[in-house]
Image (spheres, rainbow, N blue to C red):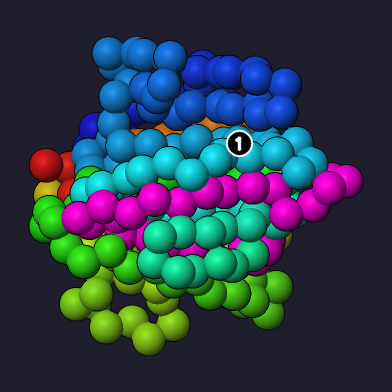
């Protein structure tokens, strides 16, 4: 087993006034040669966007994008004729494929929005762009790790899908709960991100917004040490 620990305070940071960003991996003006990506996971940005503010129309291609609002809501508009609002409790996926443009704005004029945006390298390039979003009821499935994103060929009817052999798993847990997670393939790793609360994994204590990457293992075990919300991302390592 190999692992890398990313405490929250070691993330890259940017403050543009309207946007306060934390970068788990190199992004924009933040570059750390030791933190470019984790396997096929290229970006994990923790953004807080001011009321009515956001990102104007901009392009993407050949990237699988997942957006997870933690509080507030996000207004999305793209060149595929989707115009949606994504709320906390919902997950959005977008395969940029051959190319897409979109804008993202805080849907509220009075409250900030906090979200995670993650980019995963695609399994195949130049696919047809696509968009989807879905609400998940984590409260009724408390103390359970819910698969919210999977590969299309996994055929998980409750999950959204991406053009990559990746699994996003999210759950809310009471204190002193043990989460046993078995990886789907030998060449995969998991990136564990504590959204809130605290936990311990492989003798490593994790606090809010800390992360731990683990690979060359068949399974991991996480034990919460307080009430916690945890994201477990499984990706190919090469």
Left or right? Give the position of 110 relative to 101.
right
Q: Give the residue at x 65% y 20%.
A: 16
Q: Position of residue 86 (x, y in %)?
A: 62, 63
Q: How many numbered marks have been drawn onto this rendered protein structure?
A: 1
Height in image: 196 above or below 16?
below
The percent coordinates of residue 59 (x first, y second) are: 36, 43
Res. 137 image quadrant: bottom right
Residue marked by disc 1: 47
Q: Quadrant of the N terminus?
A: top left
Q: Which contiguous range is marked in magenta?
A: 86-112
Is residue 58 visible from the viewing direction of this image? yes
Give the residue displayed 51% in from the left and 21% down from the top. 11
The vertical placement of 7 against 103, above or below, is: above
Residue displayed at 39% across by 66% down: 80
Q: Is residue 205 left or right of residue 75?
A: left
Q: Which of 136/119 is in front?
A: 119
Which residue does the image show at 46% across and 59% down from the upper left? Answer: 78
Residue 233 location (% of width, % of height): 38, 52
Percent across and percent down for residue 38 are 28, 35
- Residue 69 lies left or right of residue 35; in this view the side is right
């Amino acid at each position: 087993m190999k692992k890398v620990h990313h405490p929250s305070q070691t993330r890259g940071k940017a403050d543009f006034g309207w946007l306060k960003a934390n970068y788990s991996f190199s992004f924009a003006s933040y570059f750390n040669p030791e933190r470019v990506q984790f396997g096929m996971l290229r970006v994990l940005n923790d953004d807080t966007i001011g009321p009515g503010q956001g990102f104007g129309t901009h392009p993407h291609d050949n990237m699988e994008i997942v957006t997870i609002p933690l509080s507030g809501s996000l207004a999305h508009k793209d060149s595929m004729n989707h115009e949606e609002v994504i709320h906390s409790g919902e997950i959005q996926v977008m395969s940029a494929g051959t190319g897409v443009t979109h804008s993202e704005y805080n849907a509220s004029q009075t409250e900030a929005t906090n979200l995670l945006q993650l980019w995963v390298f695609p399994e195949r390039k130049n696919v047809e762009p696509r968009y989807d979003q879905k609400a998940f009821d984590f409260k009724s499935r408390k103390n359970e790790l819910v698969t919210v994103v999977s590969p299309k060929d996994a055929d998980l009817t409750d999950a959204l899908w991406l053009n990559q052999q990746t699994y996003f798993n999210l759950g809310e847990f009471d204190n002193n709960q043990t989460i046993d997670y078995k990886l789907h393939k030998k060449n995969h790793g998991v990136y564990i991100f504590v959204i809130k609360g605290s936990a311990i994994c492989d003798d490593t204590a994790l606090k809010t917004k800390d992360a731990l990457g683990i690979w060359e293992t068949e399974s991991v075990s996480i034990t919460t040490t307080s009430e916690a919300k945890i994201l477990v991302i499984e990706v190919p390592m090469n």
